[in-house]
Amino acid sequence: MTAKLLGRLLQLPTAASALLAPAKILPAAYTAVGSLHPDQHGRISFRRHFFDLHKMVDKEAIKREKDRLKDELSRGYFADFSEIHKNSGKIAPANKTLIASMAAAMFPDIVVYFSDGRRLKLPLSDQNVNNHSTEIIPSATLLCLSFRASSQRMAESWSAPFLETLDASTNVQVYEVSFIESWLLSLNPMKNLFLKIARSSSYPLRRIAYSFGDHYDLRKELQILNLLTGYIFLLDRHGRIRWQGFGFATTEEVSSLLSCATLLLEE
């Protein structure tokens, strides 16, 4: 009598009811009351970490876009034009001496296309050229970047005297790269049509190339702010930036470029 009363107070089954009650079958996901099967626990843990990572990535992406928008709004066409007009196309003087190899920064990789549809990753270096490639890594590469059509003539003011002086050497190469950031022209059908009518060069040591898509990260890494001027880089065979110029070339700056290129060929 006492046991029955105590069982009711504690809401525990009596011995008789436990024997008569049908056994309850627990789901396979449970090994005991309130505990998960290890596989199920792993799946839930993975989902939780996945969503936490997704939220973190979203926050980073949002912050990155905010920073980008701030950068883009801080400058505009009129600010760029004003800077170019005041300095005759110069935003900074060119290097006068060769940058030491230990202090030189690596030029970031960019994918470029030629008018015949061929694709290439620049700069040509030991990392970007495999044993099956027909590309020869030059000892000195002049890489001219143009973000607007108006700066293409600036690139030619550097490349023409560079090739006139060093064309006897097979260890030099010039790439004049124009950046096409239009999303429409970056689509494959439009890109292929654009390349068919794009300008090209018949001179082997001077190659005109095009890079499509968003280049914000590249501009950020190279500290490129003004898109109306040209950016000229002299690279060594390892893809390191050993000299840099801007805008239209002056006689003095061409002289320093040729001197630095000659030193690179002797390294």
Image: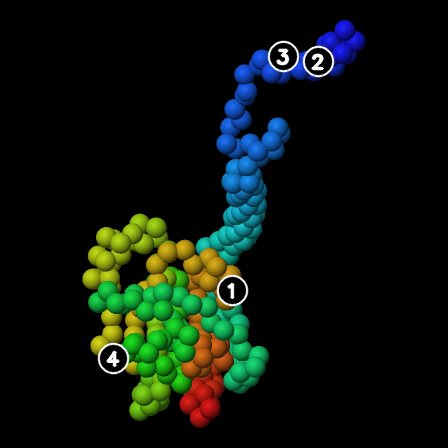
Q: CA distance from mark 2 to mark 3?
A: 12 Å
Query: Which residue carries the number 1 mark?
Result: 221
Residue 185 locus on image (x, y percent): 30, 53
Q: Which secondary structure lies at badge 2?
A: loop
Which circle marks residue 203 in the picture?
4
Instruction: Give yes or no for contact between labels 1 and 2 (Cβ–Cβ under 8 Å).
Output: no
Confirm whether residue 157 shows in the render. no
Secondary element at image label 3: helix
Whether tag 2 and tag 3 are in contact, CB under 8 A, the answer is: no
N-terminal label among 4 and 3? 3
Tag 3 or tag 2, which sits nearer the N-term? 2
Residue at image point 54% right, 16% down:
22
Q: Nearer the viewer, mark 1 or mark 4?
A: 1
The residue carrying mark 2 is 11
Dot 1 or dot 4: first in sequence order is 4
Amino acid, disc 3? Ser
Separation (CA) of disc 4 from disc 3: 98 Å
Query: Camera-side residue: 51 or 64?
Result: 51
Query: How many C-alpha atoms fall within 10 Å of the one at disc 2: few (<14), some, or many (≥20)?
Result: few
Mark 4 → mark 2, Cα distance in angstroms = 95 Å
Q: Secondary structure at mark 1?
A: helix
Q: Nearer the viewer, mark 4 or mark 3?
A: 3
Structural distance between the alpha carbons of marks 3 and 1: 76 Å
Instruction: Say which of marks 3 and 1 sits in front.
Output: 3
Please, what is the three-letter code of the amino acid marked with disc 1? Glu
**57 or 210: nearer the viewer:** 57
Q: Residue at x 57, y 33 (%)?
A: 31
Kind of residue at disc 2: Gln
